[in-house]
Image (cartoon, rainbow, N blue to C red):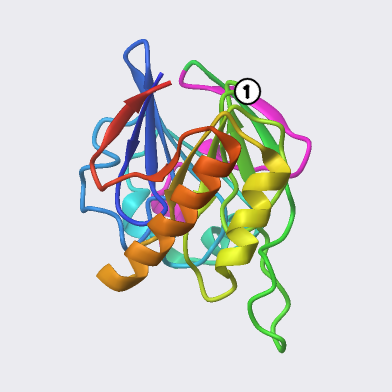
Amino acid sequence: MKLTKYGHACVRLEKDGRSLVIDPGELTLEGAATAGVDAVLITHEHADHYSLGRLWGIPEVYASPGIVRILEDLDDFRELDHDNIHAVREGDTFEVAGFNVRVFGEKHHLSNLDVPPVDNVGFLIDDEVFHPGDALTRVDVPTLLVPGQAPWLTAPMTAAYLRAVRPERAFAIHDGLVNKWGLEVMERVLAMESERAGRPYRRMEIAESVEL
């Protein structure tokens, strides 16, 4: 399975000539991530993870219930193939594009004291790689896509999440709002945790690919 990181929190997974993309939002490279893709998975409704413009022509879309409610309220919803847009929840399992997908989590991490968290689901692909969206959902997994920076996240929280999950490898995503100084801090945190655990924890560059 090949994993490629695109802008911010977006990744593409490819296997046996088929592909799926998770969270192609407004910070994702235009067109590159979703070109020829078989399915899109969306963790939650924030613009850095979801963009309506990325959904036109996508054969299958699996998303948190909040995303599906938004789509159903849009005038343009009739132009999408709504039979191929599926709401998924904690505990769901489905097959798409040759991948087995398991769903974990229910809500976004608390980010505003006056606004309830939106729906957020994480996707475990082929029991190999887990994308948590904007939550620190604990799943026993070999490859963790760990949020690197967010308004709701601190460096100690990132370290604690890695220590709780103890993945064999971790790649930081969710870094599209960080300047070069912030990226250096993030990379130092990952390097310290990598040394502590004796496992490779690092940030992926945009358009970088790894084989899992």
Q: Residue at x 68, y 61 (%)?
A: 119
- Height in image: 82 above or below 129? below
Q: Relative to the observer, which residue lies in front, 122 or 174? A: 174
Give the labeled residue for mark 1: 127
Q: What is the secondary structure assignment of the residue under circle 1?
A: loop
- Looking at this rendering, what residue extends furthest in the top direction? 16
Asked if residue 34 lies left or right of residue 148, the reply is left
Q: In this image, 21 relative to 84: left or right?
A: left
Q: Residue at x 66, y 52 (%)?
A: 161
Tell me which residue sits at (50%, 67%) in the image: 46
Quadrant of residue 139 in the image? Answer: top right
- Identify the residue at horizontal 33%, vertical 47% (top origin): 56
Q: Quadrant of the C terminus?
A: top left
Q: Is residue 188 above or below residue 113?
A: above
User: Is 86 in the magenta?
Assistant: yes
x and y, in percent, of residue 28 in the image: 29, 55
Amino acid under disc 1: Asp
